[in-house]
Image: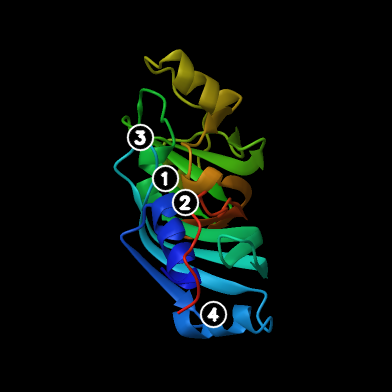
Amino acid sequence: MSIFENIRKTAITLLRADKIEFEPPPRAIARGVLARRLDQFEIRATGVPIEHTDVKIAQLDVFATDVELRLSLRGPSIHIGAASYQATLTQEQLSVLVPLPPGVERLSVTRRGFTFHTVAGIPIYTSVKLSDNKIVVAPSAPAKVPLLDLIGIDIDLPQLPMTSGLEQLARFGLSFSLPELPANATIEELELHDGFAIISGTLDLTPGDTPPEGPD
């Protein structure tokens, strides 16, 4: 097995991706590392599953840095000093990943925050921040009846038969823990866009204990 094949198999195992692509191409990475002229490369993984959910990240970009060749009696190997990632989640995926309180059927994502859509058709607008690997949302405006809001009349959230979780969300906000990501990934940044969110952070691409047999 080549030193590159070793790291490719390690990446597939850790990320559990449907497909892995490298930039620069595999042979260029192997030659560059062997010649000690390459210390970073990128991995594009597609179809990366998220633990205990049916959600797959369509595309996850991994940036491996501080890459070096290590020699031992068992042969050469590639060591990755650090790795970061960036992944896109659609608002449909976030509706699955975020544990919505009873009474909320879905959420939508804008640059300003999350909007929680209740089964009664009343939207709850929130601002969003990331804290200790949790999504923290806080009401950014009073919940309103859409029709009355459209004609310029503001009213507080009507007295509905709300669950305690929905009432907490509407009046004070809530925090939500996201499921575990592959490769011991940490979520360090959350960037909102209209219709999707980009998460980024670090992950662990440390190869396993099985050594490669040598270069191609």
36 relative to 71, above or below = below
Comparing 70 with 58, the one in front is 70
Q: Nearer the viewer, mark 4 or mark 3?
A: 4
Comes first in the chain, label 1 or label 2: 1
Determine whether label 1 and label 2 are within 8 Å by CB.
yes
- Residue 131 vs residue 161: left or right? right
Label 4 Cα crowd, 10 Å radius (few <14 / some 14-19 / many 20+): many
Where does label 2 land, which residue? 109
Q: Mark 2 belongs to which amino acid?
A: Val
Where does label 1 land, which residue? 94
Label 2 Cα crowd, 10 Å radius (few <14 / some 14-19 / many 20+): many
C-alpha separation, residue under disc 3 versus residue under disc 2: 23 Å
Q: Nearer the viewer, mark 1 or mark 3?
A: 3
Label 1 Cα crowd, 10 Å radius (few <14 / some 14-19 / many 20+): many
Comes first in the chain, label 1 or label 4: 4
Q: Residue 52: which numbered mark, if any?
A: 3
| Residue drawn at 45 percent across, 72 percent down | 2
Q: Mark 4 belongs to which amino acid?
A: Ile
